[in-house]
Image: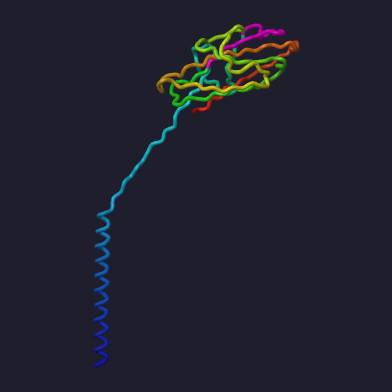
Amino acid sequence: MTSNTTSETTRQRGRKVAAILAGGLVLGVGTMATLASWNDSEFANATFTAGKFVFQGSLNGTSYSDHATTGAAAALSFTTPVANLTPGDVVAAPFAIRLGAGTTNDATVSIAAPTTTGSVSDLTWQLIDTGSTFGCTAATTGTSVVASSAFTAGSASFTITKGATVAADGTAKNLCFKVTAGGGLTQSQTGSATWQFQAISQ
């Protein structure tokens, strides 16, 4: 008799535990459903596009193109007697730079002493801003950009601006290189110089 009572009691307890667990399970599902109905999301995204930078040079003030390496350097056309210098001679060559159409930022431009080959002893150079006029001679005057310097020295930096619209070219900066032969110029010497204008987008 005791054994049967014990078994019955055990079965009743098992049914109660199962009922409690089932109730807890239902309660859990109901809680999850309630929480889900109070959840929401927001998403945000953006597109990132780089600007464009077009830096150009011109030998005639009209046609502009890229001269981005020493191998593609623009060949400056100095006035005579660039191929027959004597002490005191001054020769000049014009060059213009600008930011081309499509450019999205102004630029800071720097120029430093040229790299040279051969012999350029006792020669000095200077750079002049000729304003809105392209072209120069030994007599040309303007705003000094680089004062008269040995070929191993001289530097400057300045700002050039982009066009009024992205589709427009920027205002050209017209420049004049002047080279002067000193009194100690060596006979028959010959050498070349390459100047680099480096533009950095602002």
> In this picture, is 97 found above or below 23?
above
**The N terminus, quarter of image:** bottom left
Question: Is residue 95 in the magenta section?
Answer: yes
Which is nearer the eye, 9 or 4? 9
**Residue at coordinates 26% horizontally, 54% vertically from top-left?**
38
Residue lying at the far bottom of the rendered structure: 1
The percent position of residue 16, horizontal first and vertical second, equals 24, 77
Mainly helix, strand or loop, the magenta region?
A: loop
The percent position of residue 51, horizontal first and vertical second, equals 44, 29
Residue 53 appears in the figure: yes
Residue 68 appears in the figure: no
Left or right of 88? Residue 141 is: left
**Residue at coordinates 71% horizontally, 14% vertically from top-left?**
190
The percent position of residue 191, horizontal first and vertical second, equals 69, 16
Residues rendered magenta in the picture: 79-96
Question: Is residue 185 in the magenta section?
Answer: no
> In this picture, is 159 found above or below 38?
above
Left or right of 191? Residue 107 is: left
